[in-house]
Image (cartoon, helix red, strand yellow):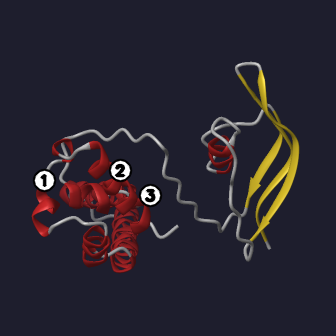
Amino acid sequence: MSLVVFSDVSLHLGGRPIVENLSLRIGDKDRVGLVGPNGSGKTTLLRLIAREQTPDGGAVHRAKTMRLGYLPQDVTVEGGKPLLAFVLESIPGRASLDEDLATAEADLEALSAAGDHSEEAQEQMLEAAGRIADLHERIAHFDGEYSEHHAKRIMAGLGFKDSDHVRDMSEFSGGWKMRAVLSSLLFQQP
């Protein structure tokens, strides 16, 4: 099975060709190393795979089931959030589940407060309650797969102390911010 397929990919940066008509397949069992001098396009290839850059020509295809982790060379991390929250909230889709749950609960509350006992209103309330139950189940599954304990183990493995978990991201140096981003990346289990 191919995880990544480049089909006649071309890319120019600043008028300079970085990649010309590249065709390449990376399979699920392949091990690939990108080796070359600075400026030869190694990072650009990774950015193409991560969909952070679009080729001028050709196409880059990724397997739908592929989970990619990409740690850029330069990271920009805003403050205002503790380290542990930064890592826990890095999972794509988790925040939207909380938002969907809040919306469904507000819908159910509004329907209940309206005092309408018609069959249609009862069906709407049952539908809202079903959405809430489904969202709670999805959140429980999410939280089971991406537990706080697991996040803390990853952070400890990268040298963070327990006392660092509550520190604001703005308090960390550039190197420690890079470790925080790496923690969040590893937590996502790419």
* Residue farthest to the front, as pictured: 37
Q: In what element is the residue under mark 3? A: loop
Mark 3 or mark 1: name the one nearer the start of the chain. Answer: 3
Question: Which numbered tag is attached to residue 167?
Answer: 1
Dot 1: element = loop
Cβ atoms under marks 3 and 2 closer than 8 Å: no
Cα distance in 3D space between marks 3 and 1: 23 Å
The amino acid pointed to by label 1 is: Arg
Q: In which quarter of the image is the N terminus?
A: bottom right
Residue 44 position, x and y percent, is 66, 40
Front position in the image: 59 or 154: 154
Q: Is mark 2 on a helix, strand or loop?
A: helix
Dot in front, 1 or 2? 2
Front residue of this view, candidates 173 and 57: 173
Q: Residue at x 9, y 64 (%)?
A: 163
Give, as a three-letter code, the residue at label 2: Met
The circle drawn on residue 92 is 3
Amino acid type at circle 3 is Pro
